Every structure is written in C-alpha cells, then in structure tokens.
Image (cartoon, rainbow, N blue to C red):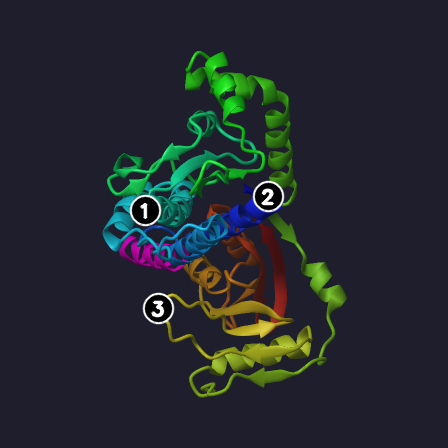
Amino acid sequence: MKITEKTWLEYITRLSRMNEEAGKKMADYIAGHGTQDTDALIEYAAALVQKYGEGSAELACQMYDAMAEKAGANVPPAEPAEPADYGETARMVNATKQSPPQLQGGVSRLVKRAGADTTLKNAIRDGAEWAWVPHGDTCPFCITLASRGWQKAGEKTLKGGHAEHIHAHCNCEYAIRFDSRTSVAGYDPEKYLAQYKAADGDINAMRRAQYAANRDAINAQKRAAYAARKSNSGPEDVLEEYRRTAKPGEGSITYDEGYNRTRHADEIKTAQWLHDILGGDIVLLQEAGGLFEKTPDFLWRQKGWELKSTTTEKSADTALRSALKQISDNPGGVILNYFHHEVQIESVLEIVTRRLLRQEKCNADILIVLNGKLEAAIRYKK
C-alpha cells in the first residue's frame, strides 16, 4: 500500500494549519496586550496549546486509524496524547517572552508536538514502524532524521515522554506503517542518506551548503520583504481622504441587545457626531464578558472602532495603547475626542506617531477630534 502524495499533503496541511493558527493567535494577543503581564500571557498560551493541541492529536488519531484499517491491522483505536500541561507551557513562556517571535513559535511547536506524540505513542503500543517524512524546504536536521528510513517504534523513540525533533515552521511529519509493503509517495530515505554522506555526516556543513546554494534567492526574499514593510508601514495623513469620502447623515445607528445607554453617553454622542459628519452604518456594542475577549466601542463600516475621551496631549499615549488592544481582532481605528479641552494638535500628533511606531503590530486609523471638528486623521500600517 502506498499513501498517495495527495493524501499525505492533505494530512500535513491540516496539521500545519492548526499549529500556525495557534501561533498567529499568540502573535495577535501579544500585539494587543504586550508581554508585561506574564500570568495573563501564560493563561492565554496554555489555552491555545490545550485547544489546538487537542485538535492536532485528534487529527493524528484519524490518520492512524485510517492506516491501520487499510493495512488490516488488528489494533485498538488510537488514543490522543495529552497536550503540554500548564507548567510546561509556563516554562516555555518564561523562556521566550522577551522575544515575541520565539514565543509564537513555542506555542506552534507545542501544538505540533501533540500530534507527533499521538502518532508515536500509538505506534509503540502497537509495534508499528515510523519514518520522518520531509516536506518543502527541508532543513538539514530533518534530512538527517529522514535518512534513517523506517524504524521500529519503541520507548527510545520518545525522550522525556515526548517526540523529539519538533520545531515550528516545519511541515515534516511522522508517518507510520504496519507492514513493510506500505510507503509514502515521494519519501526516499536513500536520497536523504546520500545527502548526509556527501557532507560526511556534518549537519552544519549541510546547512552551509544549503545556504550557499540558495543564497541569492534568500537574500532577494529578504530585500523584497524589507521593501514591502517599508512601503506599507508608517504614518500617513489621510484627513483629505476622510473629507472627500464623507457622506454626512447616510447610514444608520443601531445598538447591541442590552446596550446600557446611560453608561455610554460619550460613545453615543460620538457615534452621532460620526454619523452626522462622515456617515455610514454604526453599531454600538455591548462590552464582552470574557477575560480575554476584546470588544470595541462600536462597529463603523463593519470595522472595530474605539473611542477615547482625552483631556491632555500626554494622555493620548496611554489612551491609544489601550484602544488598539480593543480593536486588534477587526481593526478600524481609534477616535481621540478632546471635546472642548484645549490642546496643541501638533503635540498630540507627535505623541500619537511615537506610540504607533512602538506598536509591534498595528493597522489602524487615528481620528483626532477637537470641539466637534475632525482636526487630523492618521493611518498606520505595520
């Protein structure tokens, strides 16, 4: 029996989506909340690892059972492995919280490991064989592991009770089989062994050779990515755009069920101003009840917007930092409304720009309103 390329690709793609989605949600959380509150950071990371790790393990069970059925193996249904517990997740967060990309990768790795643990632990239970099957731009370490071919699963397969060699941003996966007639389309351990031997078993030499062979393409990708970031980021004055596209009085103002109008007088007043001056459908939203749920004050043109009633130039920094967290899931923008407080718009713009530049991730428009007049509109993408 041969696992077709289509079947294998579908399986590893579904697994990859889970660990990538968990990592992305971790990155979004950090962008909205920062990394200062370690306890909250651990709570959120642990919830992601649990939820997506369970999904990864369940998918691995499905693949395992399908392989056993096709091979006619008389084995019990696969049992999902437990995702990393709270303590291990906490240790990972504490070790990586100073580097958001590493923290994001740590969450992805733990999610991926739950699927790998499931495959190997069931293979050990049933005496199946395993192989490490590379995919895509495979790193030398994975090539080395793949060069070992099919191996009998045993207790030494695991280290500390878990699958080894699991790293983020990698679509290589464990395959299992119940008899020597089974293979995975495209898996060629002899080819990988030849690459390993050509480097005299030196993985670092393989890394250097791989980089040298792809250096021009890698550098070109880096330059293109940098240019894209530069061209698509930074503050942009869009006041004239807002004035040009304004449709005063058009659209409607509606309220979430249970919306407390007494407690939200400023939000209602600002929504009415927005409707009268710029137009568009506005929905005033009820606050979220969950610890990690983020709800903006209202939806305007189907995007999240947050109102901050401010009094001084300096207060713009704290207000904006808090507001950007609330709209991170569906960013539209923030309205800094000074009402009738006298401030220097130039000073406010300077403070706003500095805050936006410090944000690790930010896509939002900032509207500055003074005495009922739209004085400035800044768009920032990062």
Dot label at residue 4: 2
User: Mark 1 or mark 3, which is nearer the start of the sequence?
Assistant: 1
Q: Is mark 3 on a helix, strand or loop?
A: loop
Disc sitting over residue 293 in the figure: none
Which residue lies at the image location 38% right of the left edge and 60% below the top edge? 51
Q: Which mark is residue 121?
A: 1
Relative to 281, 82 lies left or right: left
Frontmost residue, 362 versus 174: 174
- Contact between labelled residues 1 and 3, with CB atoms less than 8 Å apart: no
Observer-side mark, 2 or 3, equals: 2
Q: Where is residue 93 in the image (x, y as percent from the top left)?
A: 31, 47
Task: Name the disc covering residue 291, or none.
Answer: 3
- Residue placed most toward the observer, 105 or 145: 145
Q: Most prominent secondary structure in the magenta stretch?
A: helix
Q: Is residue 256 magenta?
A: no
Can you say whether 292 is above or below 357 in the image? below
Other-residue count near label 2 (Cα within 10 Å), few / some / many at <14 / 14–19 / ≥20: few
Of 33 and 270, nearer the camera is: 33
Q: Give the range drawn in magenta.
A: 38-52
Identified by mark 1, the residue type is: Lys
Q: Residues within 10 Å of mark 3 (few under 14, many from 20)?
A: few
Residue 41 included in the magenta stretch of the image: yes
User: Percent position (x, y) of residue 201?
Assistant: 42, 15
Q: In which quarter of the image is the N terminus?
A: top right
Residue 324 in the image: x percent, y percent? 48, 60
Cα–Cα span, label 3 and label 1: 35 Å
- The answer to whether residue 31 is seen in the rendering is no
Please determine whether, in this image, residue 185 is positioned above or below residue 216: below
| CA gap, disc 1 and disc 2 | 24 Å
